[in-house]
Amino acid sequence: MIAKKHTDYTATQNACKLCTPLGASLVLKGIENAVPILHGSQGCATYIRRYLISHFKEPVDIASSNFSEDTAVFGGSANLQLGIDNLRAQYKPDIIGIATTCLSETIGEDVTMILRDYRAAHPDQDLPAIINVSTPSYTGTHIDGFHSTVKSAVELLAHNGVESKHVNVMPGMLSPADIRYLKTMLTDFGLSYVMLPDYSETLDGGLWDEYQHIQSGGTKVVEIESMGCAQASLEFGRVLATQSSAGKTLAKKFNVPCHSLGTPIGIRETDQLLDTLEEITGRPTPAHYHRERGRLLDAYVDGHKYVSQKRAVVYGEEDLVIGLVSFLREIGIIPVICASGGESGLMEEKLRAIVPDFDALGMSVWDGVDFVEITELAEKCQPDFLIGNSKGFSVARQINVPLVRVGFPIHDRLGGSRVLHIGYAGAQQLFDKVANVLIEAKQEATGVGYSYM
Amino acid sequence: MTTINVLEKRQKQIYEKGEQPFDMVCDKVSLAGSVSQRACVFCGSRVVLYPIADAVHLVHGPIGCAAYTWDIRGALSSGPELHRLSFSTDLREKDVIFGGEKKLHRALIDLIDTHQPKAAFVYSTCIVGLIGDDVEDICRRVSEEKGIPVLPVHSEGFKGTKKDGYRAACDALFKLIGQGSTEDIGPYSINILGEFNIGGEAWIIKEYYRRMGIEVVSIMTGDGRVDDVKRSHGAHLNVVQCSGSMTQLAKMMEDKYSIPFIRVSYFGLEDMSKALYDVANHFGHNPDILRKTQQLVREEIAQVYPELQKIRRDLQGKKAAIYVGGAFKAFSLIKALKYLGMRVVLAGSQTGNKSDYQLLKELCDDGTIIVDDANPLELSKYIIEKDADLFIGGVKERPIAYKLGIGFCDHNHERKTPLAGYVGMLNFAKEIHATVTSPVWNFAPRRQRLAVK
C-alpha cells in the first residue's frame, strides 16, 4: 500500500536525495578528457565536488561559471564563455559538459544559444566538443540529472554511420567496481561496447607518477559519436525503462534496438542480462559465470536460515531499490519498507511486477520521502536491518539496527567505489554482507559469545 | 614532465617570496572556469551559524544546499543536536513559478512545533530573491506567532563571496545579542568568537579560561546556545578566533556595547599561550588571573613537551604546504610547523585580505609560494615544484596530496580530532607524524621516482 505522506508544505528533513547537477557531474566525470562546468554560483560546484570526493576519495574537478549579482541581472553568457576559455587553457579537454543549476534556469538562461555564440566567435579554432544539459535543481533528483546527461550526450554527439557490431551500455548510477565487472562480462562475450558513462577509472584510479590534469579513462567522444551505429543498446533500470532515455533516443533516431533490463542485482536479474547477451551475440554464457552462479547458489543455501523472513528497510534511488528488492526476495528477506527520495510515481508498479506476493508480505512503498519519515516508518515496523547508502546511518543509530552500506554515497567508510552490486559476484558480496550482519547481530544479542554460527 | 600553466588572470594572486615586490591581488570574486576551492555566500553563513545546537536551521531553496551541508561539521554539542539535522523547503518548479512563501511559512511552523527550538535561522539560497519571496516578512510573522526569534540570513549564493556570508551570519547573530539578561555576569568575563567546537575544541579552551578564573559568557558559535548569545553583550571582552568570520561581529559589539576585542588563535603552543596571556593581561588589574595563567601554561606545556620533542626529531627539515579557508589559521599553522622543525613551502587561503597576505609573507621563508583563492592545478603545481612532504587542507585538497604521494593533515571543519589547545597541538603533531612517516609512500610512483634520482 502506498500511504500518503503528510502535507506538501512540510520541510524536507535529512533528504534522501540530492540535486540534479550532482548526477550530471558524475556522468561528465565518466567521459574521457572531459571537464564539467556548472552554470551557476561557485558553491554548487564546490559542494558537489566535496560530496563526490568524500565518497570516491579521488580528485573531482568541477568548474563554475561563478555568477555574481551582475550576472544574475544581465545574464551569464559572458561568465560562461570566460569559463569555457579558462577551462580550455587550463585543462585542454576533449569535451566540456555544461550543466545548469536552479539559478541559471530561474533567470532563463539559454545555454544552447550561448554556445552558438561561442562557436561563432571562435570560427578558426579547434574547439573541444561542448555539450549542455538542463538540470534545474528544483526538478527531480540527482538520478534524473544523471539520466538527462547521458541522454543529452547521446542526442548531441551520436550520429549515423555504417552499422557496427558494438553495443551501447547505459548502466545507470553504479559503482566503479560494477562498471568494471560489466566491462569484463561484455569482453567475455566477445562484444565490443560503448559504456556511458564509464567512471570506473576516472573515479577509482591509482596513484600518479606525474600530475594528471584530468584522470585517465572514461568514454571517448568518438565512442559516444558511434553510438548511433551500434547493433543494440542495453539500458538498466525498470523505472528508467518507462521514462525517456538515451536508449530510447538511439532507438528512435538511429533504429538501434534497446534492451531495457532491470539493474542486474541478484540471480534473476543477472540471468536476464546473460540471456540478453546470449541473444545479442549468439554465444553461450562463458563457463566461469555458471561456476560463479553455482557458488552463489551454494552460499544462498548455506546461509538461508540466517536471512529467511528477516525484515529490511531498503532506500535510495528508485532503480537501486528495485534491484535490491529483487535480490532480497530471492533469499527470503521481506523488504517491509521500500523508500526513495525520488518521485517518478513508478516505483510501486515496478516493485509489484517483481514481487507477486507484495500485499501478502506486508510490503510498503514510499516515494518522495526523507530520512526523518523513513525513521518514523522504520520504528513502526521493527526491521532487522537497513540497506542503502551511508546517509541512513542516522536512522540505523536511532532505531538500533545494523546498516548494510551500498550505493551512493558511502561517506563514513572506505571502499564505496569497490562495492560490487551487480552480477553473480555482486550478489555474492551482498549476500555475505547481509548474512554476516544478521549473524553478528545475533552473536552480540545473546551475550553468550558463541564461537560457531 | 607534465607542465601546469597558471591562467594569466590568476597570476597576480600568486606570489613567490623574494622574487618581486609584494603586490598581492586578493579579496575578489573567483574567476569563472578556474575551479576555485571556495564555496559561496551560503557556505559562509552556514559554517558560522551551524554549531548553534538549539536552533532550527532551515535552508530555503531547492534541495541541494541543505543536502550537501547535512551533518557536515565535526561541531559537537553538550546537549541538543538540532544543528545536525538538515531542513529544507525543498522548492520545486511550481514554487519557482508561484513563489515559496507559503511553503516557507508552513515549514517553519511545523519545524518549530516539532522541535521546540530557541530560535530559527532561515537561509536564503540563490533563487529566493529571484522568485520574489519576502523572507523578512515571513520570519517576522512566524516570530510573532511562535514567540521565538526567527532570523533571516541573507545568504544567496551568488551575492558575493564566502566572506559576505560571514557578514550575513554576524548580522543575524547581532539581532539576538542584547535580548537576554546580563545579571550575574562578573567583571572577568569574555565571549569566545569564531570557535566552533570541532572535535570539542571549545570545551578545551573554555576549561583553560575557567582555570584562569575567567568566566565564558558565550561561545559563538561552538556548542552554541541561543540564550547565551542573547546575553553575550554582558561580557567584558570579546576574544576573536578565526578572525575572517567573526571580527565583523566583534566590531559591531564594540560600537554598540563598548566591548573591546582582541584577536587570538588557539593553534600551536606559541599562539595558544599568547591567547591566554592576552586575556590575562586585559584583566591585568587582577594579578591572580595572571598567576593562574602562568601556572596553567607551565603545566600544560610540560605535559606535551616530551612527546613533541620526539616527534620533532622525525619531522625535522620536512616541507609543508598549507591551503586553508582563512589566512589567520595559516599564521598559526606556520608557527606550529616551525616548532616541529618543518618548513612551509606553500601558504594560501580562500579568503585572506591584503594585510593577511602581508603578514603571511613576513612569516614565510624566501621561496615560499603565497596564493589567494587557488585551484587544484595551482596547488598541484606548487606542491610538486616545491616537493612538499605534507599538505594541510580540507576534503577537496586531500586527494590531490594523496595522488601525488604526499602526506595530509585535515585541518578543516569536518575533522573529528581537536587540534586547538595544548592537547590539540599534540594531536596535530601526532597526525602529521603518522601521515608523513607512513611506509605507504614507499610504494607511491612519484616518491619512488624521486628516490631514484
Image (cartoon, rainbow, N blue to C red):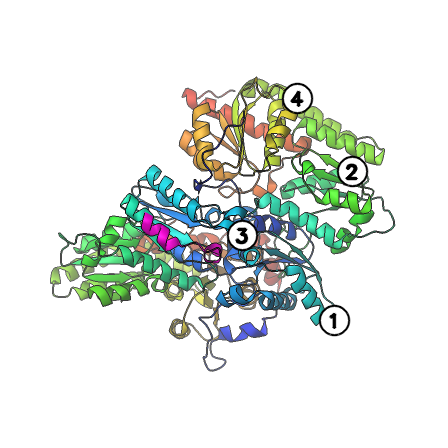
- Which tag is nearer the camera, tag 3 or tag 4? 3
* Both labels 3 and 1 in a single chain: yes
Disc 1 to disc 2: CB gap under 8 Å: no
Residue B378 visible in the snapshot: yes
Give the secondary structure at mark 3.
helix
For label 3, the crowd category at 10 Å Cα-Cα, with few meaning under 14, some 14 to 19 and many 20 or more, is: many
> Label 3, label 4: how many angstroms apart (C-alpha)?
42 Å
Q: Does label 2 lie on the same chain as label 4?
A: yes
Looking at this view, is B232 or B374 the one in front? B232
Q: How far apart are the alpha carbons under marks 3 and 1?
A: 33 Å
Q: Specify start and end residues of the magenta stretch as a single range.
A: B126-141
Q: What residue is disc 4 on?
A: A298
Q: Which mark is residue A48?
A: 3
B414 horizontally vs B375: left or right: left
Q: Which residue is labeled 2 in the image? A: A188
The residue under label 3 is which amino acid type?
Ile
Closest to the camera, between mark 4 and mark 1, is: 1
Q: CA distance from mark 3 to mark 2?
A: 36 Å
Structural distance between the alpha carbons of marks 4 and 2: 24 Å
Mark 4 lies on a secondary structure that is: helix
Measure the C-alpha gap from mark 1 to mark 2. Answer: 45 Å
Q: Which residue position is annotated with label 1?
A: A123
Whole-percent x, y for residue A422 in the image: 66, 34
The chain under label 3 reads A
